[in-house]
Image (cartoon, helix red, strand yellow):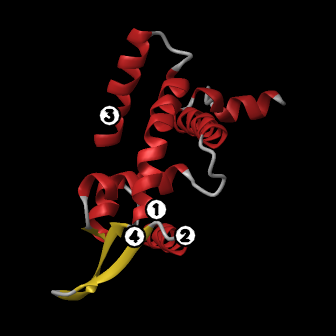
Amino acid sequence: MTDTKKDNNAGYELENQIGHLLRRAYQRHTSIFQGTIPDEHLTTVQFAVLVTIHDEGEGSLMHIGRLTAIDHATLRGITSRLKQRGLIRIRSNPDDGRERLLSLLPAGEEMVRQYIPAAQRISELTLAPLNECEQVAALHVLHKLANG
């Protein structure tokens, strides 16, 4: 790299930037998820949607989107794939035909029950490079960052 390029970066080092580090940590977490969950078609985000519906019971697409922090367009694609797999039911709200209600089908309920222990292990493995105090601190900091 030339000195001019270094000067233009003014001390900006990608490997020390929060967005880059968060992306790298998420990539590592996703890799652990994919290596632990035996369903090669289930993504971390799809699992988050299934768990949220499981915890909330039937809920609107907008409500599930808020809880999972997934934008509407992305969530529609995710729920469409989960429906195709026979894991969730999508129906119109009888009181407001524009609103879509999501609920788990028995296969979705079973998947959540079956994979929760593995998901807990995935979190442990993701945090494994940290000691116990660092794990608590990392989760605390991430909660603050996520919730502004």
Q: Residues within 10 Å of mark 2 (few under 14, many from 20)?
A: few
Secondary element at tag 4 = helix
* Identity of the residue drawn at 53% across and 39% down: 19
Secondary element at tag 2 = loop
**Residue 72: which disc?**
4
Percent of width and height locating residue 82 = 50, 67
- The residue singled out by tag 2 in the image is 85
Please tell me in which quadrant of the rendered image residue 128 appears.
top right
Outermost residue on the right side: it is 1
First of labels 4, 2 by sequence position: 4
* Identity of the residue drawn at 55% across and 25% down: 125
Outermost residue on the left side: it is 95
Percent of width and height locating residue 90 = 37, 77
Q: Look at the picture and state if 87 lies above or below 132.
A: below
Q: Separation of disc 4 and disc 3 at Cα?
A: 22 Å
* Identity of the residue drawn at 49% across and 24% down: 124
Q: Are marks 1 and 2 in contact (CB under 8 Å)?
A: yes
Amino acid type for the residue under numbered disc 2: Arg
